[in-house]
C-alpha cells in the first residue's frame, strides 16, 4: 500500500502485489479509479474532464468502480460523492467510508488484494443513518474502459418439453433495442459489445443465478463473482445483474437483495474480482474454454 497522486488527486491509495494494482481515491468517493496489471492498461474507464476535481455541487461520474443503492431514483441515486472520504489500512484491507451523504446512507468499500494472485475481494456496505427505515438494494457499478465485450451466462439450455417452467427474468429498459448489433443473444451467453461509434444507449438486466460476469478488453479479462440468493427479492423486476453502455463506456453492475434497513442497520454486498490475460473469441465454445476455467465452472 502506498499513497500516490493519480489523475490530479494527490491522496489516492495504491494497492498492489506482484501482478496487479488498483488505485482508490480518498479526495472523493469512495471510488476505485484504476484496476489493471502493473504497467498495463486501466480496465476501468476514467473521464479526463472530471479527474482531479473536488467539491462539485453536482454528482460527477469520474469513472472507475463505485457503490450506489437501487432502485435508481434521480434525487437519491445521484447524490454527490465529491468530498473526501475516511480511510484506514490494517495491513491487509483498505477501508473507504463516505459518512456525509445527504440521504443519510453511509457507504463503505473494503478492498483486500491477494498477496500472490491477480484477485481482489471487494466488500460493499450501506448503513442507514436516518431515524426512519429505508428499503434499498446495494448496487456495485464497474465502469469499464471502451472497446471491450461483456459476457453474462445464460441458464443451461433445456429443450421443450423437458422443462416447462421459466428459467429466470430478463429485464429490458425502455431504451433497449434487442436488434442493436452490439448485442449477441446466444444459447449459453448474452454478450454486449462497447462501440465508441454508436449513437444510442443500451441497458438490460437479468437474474444471474450463476453469479459471475466478465469483460474482455485487449487480451485481458475482468471477471467478477457475486452471490445469488434464491430466497431473496431483487429490485428492477428481479435483477441481480445489469449492464449499460453508451459511446464512452460499458458498465458491469451487480446488485444485492432488496433490504429494509432499520435505523443504524447495514447491509453488505460482496464481489470477487479476478484479472487474467486471455484471448477469447465470441463463440460459446471459445467462452467455455477460456472463461469458464477462470470462474471455476466446468465447460461443456
Image (spheres, rainbow, N blue to C red):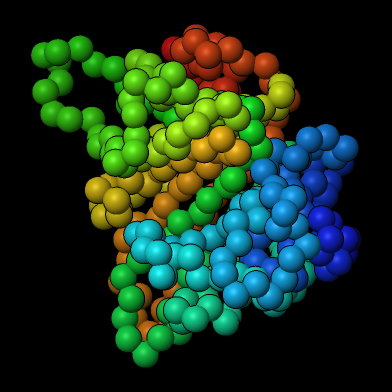
Quarter that holds the C terminus: top left
**Which residue corresponds to the image point at 33% horizontal and 25% vertical from the top-left?**
178
**Which residue corresponds to the image point at 44% horizontal and 19% vertical from the top-left?**
181
Quarter that holds the N terminus: bottom right
The spot of residue 136 in percent (x, y) is 35, 66
The spot of residue 127 in percent (x, y) is 47, 76
Camera-side residue of 139 and 111:
139
Q: Is residue 209 above or below residue 191?
A: below
Indicate left or right for 37 with 199 as reference: right
Q: Is residue 196 visible?
A: yes
**Which residue corresponds to the image point at 57% horizontal and 70% vertical from the top-left?**
58
Q: Is residue 206 visible?
A: no
Indicate left or right for 146 with 16 as reference: left
Image quarter for residue 128?
bottom left
Indicate left or right for 174 with 39 as reference: left
Q: Is residue 98 above or below residue 163?
A: below
The spot of residue 13 in percent (x, y) is 81, 62
**Which residue corresponds to the image point at 25% horizontal and 37% vertical from the top-left?**
169
Amino acid at each position: 500500500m502506498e499513497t500516490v497522486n493519480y489523475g490530479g488527486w494527490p491522496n489516492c491509495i495504491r494497492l498492489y502485489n506482484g501482478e496487479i494494482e488498483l488505485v482508490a481515491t480518498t479526495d472523493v468517493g469512495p471510488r476505485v479509479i484504476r484496476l489493471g496489471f502493473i504497467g498495463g492498461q486501466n480496465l476501468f474507464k476514467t473521464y479526463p474532464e472530471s479527474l482531479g476535481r473536488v467539491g462539485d455541487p453536482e454528482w460527477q461520474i469520474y469513472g472507475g468502480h463505485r457503490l450506489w443503492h437501487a432502485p435508481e431514483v434521480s434525487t437519491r441515486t445521484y447524490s454527490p460523492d465529491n468530498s473526501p472520504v475516511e480511510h484506514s489500512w490494517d495491513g491487509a484491507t483498505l477501508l473507504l467510508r463516505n459518512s456525509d451523504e445527504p440521504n443519510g446512507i453511509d457507504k463503505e468499500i473494503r478492498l483486500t488484494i491477494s498477496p500472490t494472485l491477480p484477485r481482489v475481494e471487494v466488500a460493499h456496505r450501506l448503513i442507514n443513518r436516518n431515524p426512519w427505515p429505508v428499503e434499498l438494494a446495494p448496487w456495485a457499478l464497474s465502469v469499464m474502459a471502451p472497446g471491450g465485450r461483456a459476457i453474462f451466462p445464460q441458464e443451461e439450455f433445456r429443450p421443450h418439453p423437458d422443462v416447462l417452467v421459466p428459467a429466470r427474468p430478463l429485464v429490458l429498459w425502455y431504451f433497449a433495442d434487442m436488434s442493436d448489433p452490439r448485442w449477441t443473444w446466444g444459447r449459453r451467453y448474452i454478450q454486449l459489445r462497447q462501440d465508441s461509434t454508436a449513437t444510442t444507449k443500451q441497458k438490460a438486466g437479468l437474474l444471474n443465478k450463476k453469479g459471475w460476469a466478465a469483460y474482455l478488453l485487449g487480451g485481458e479479462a475482468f471477471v467478477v463473482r457475486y452471490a445469488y440468493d434464491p430466497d431473496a427479492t431483487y429490485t428492477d423486476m428481479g435483477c441481480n445483474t445489469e449492464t449499460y453502455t453508451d459511446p464512452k463506456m460499458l458498465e458491469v453492475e451487480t446488485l444485492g437483495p432488496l433490504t429494509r434497513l432499520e435505523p443504524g442497520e447495514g447491509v453488505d454486498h460482496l464481489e470477487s474480482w479476478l484479472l487474467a490475460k486471455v484471448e477469447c473469441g465470441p463463440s460459446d465454445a471459445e467462452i467455455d474454454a477460456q472463461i469458464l476455467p477462470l470462474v471455476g465452472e466446468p465447460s461443456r
